[in-house]
Image (cartoon, rainbow, N blue to C red):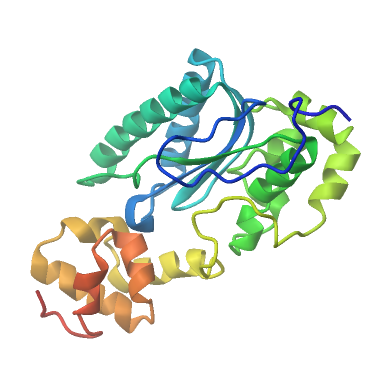
Amino acid sequence: MACVSSKCGKPGVAMTRSPRKRSESNVHHVVARGTGRQIIFENDRDRQTYLGMLSKLAEEHDCSLFAWCLMDNHVHLLVKAETEQLSTMMKRLDSAYAIVFNMRNEHVGHLFQGRFKSEPVESDAYLMTVVRYIHQNPEVAGLGAMRAYPWSSFPEYIGPASITDTAFVLSVFGGIEAFLDFHGEKDPSAPCIDENRGRNLLDASAAYAAASKAIAPAKPGDVKGMPRRERNAAIARMREASLSVRQIERLTGVSRGIIARIPSGKAGGP
């Protein structure tokens, strides 16, 4: 099995702001999240818009997309590109998508939290681990079976490929059967970067549903732009629905300090 680069050691994790750790293989695992871990995809239309922009910009910047997964509040990508090309593509992607999202959903302020995080992928073994880790995200988050989740590259590996370069990854695995066998295994200790490591992912989908029900017909993303009294009443109803301060912060973008001062069932507050 060929290495993705001449160096086949276990990669480190680039977590500091500067300088971004370079990859000798030019393969990077990228994670971008919403500011305050708030929702960045309200619906399938938003997801389709993001994927369309991603595909276009990857082609323009000569980036190969090996794997991807769109979650409610963050994105995983496995990309082959030189560091400078990757940075430029991600800056353009985040900026362009944020403009469309903000206009479409009447959102004000930054959508993404800081710059994206990335780690180099320098060995075949780690590439296989990262691909599986990305594809298993929906299952870990309690969103359903990996095969049934439409917003990852997994369906492109078992069906027609659209924006994903599946040939390279399948060559590393040694074919589709080995790919599927490897994806059938669980590895919760995988050292991949993840914006939600250490947090309770199992409640993510249920939390969004509970918040939406509590403040219907408004959406969680509407709360931040509401007048103060209306905003506080919505937050109070979400707290009454047993959502945590952290969950409400992630879903609405309202700061934790404001949320914590609003007791459940009360419309008053700051």
Q: Which quadrant, please, contains the N terminus?
A: top right
Q: Work out whether residue 95 can be spotted.
A: yes
Q: Which quadrant, please, contains the C terminus?
A: bottom left
Residue drawn where x is 34% and y is 44% of the image: 114
Residue 126 left/right relative to 235: right
Residue 119 lies, with reference to residue 235, above or below; the image says: above
| Residue 90 percent coordinates (x, y) | 43, 30
Residue 253 lies, with reference to residue 121, above or below; the image says: below
| Residue 135 percent coordinates (x, y) | 67, 47
Residue 179 left/right relative to 216: right
* Count of numbered circles in the view: 0
| Residue 134 percent coordinates (x, y) | 64, 47
Q: Work out whether residue 213 can be spotted.
A: no
Residue 42 left/right relative to 219: right
Residue drawn where x is 65% and y is 38% of the image: 153
Residue drawn where x is 74% and y is 46% of the image: 129
Residue 208 lies, with reference to residue 159, above or below; the image says: below
Residue 175 quadrant: top right
Foreground of the two, 81 or 70: 81
| Residue 19 percent coordinates (x, y) | 44, 35
Residue 261 lies, with reference to residue 65, above or below; the image says: below
Foreground of the two, 172 or 177: 172
Residue 256 left/right relative to 212: left
Residue drawn where x is 89% and y is 32% of the image: 174
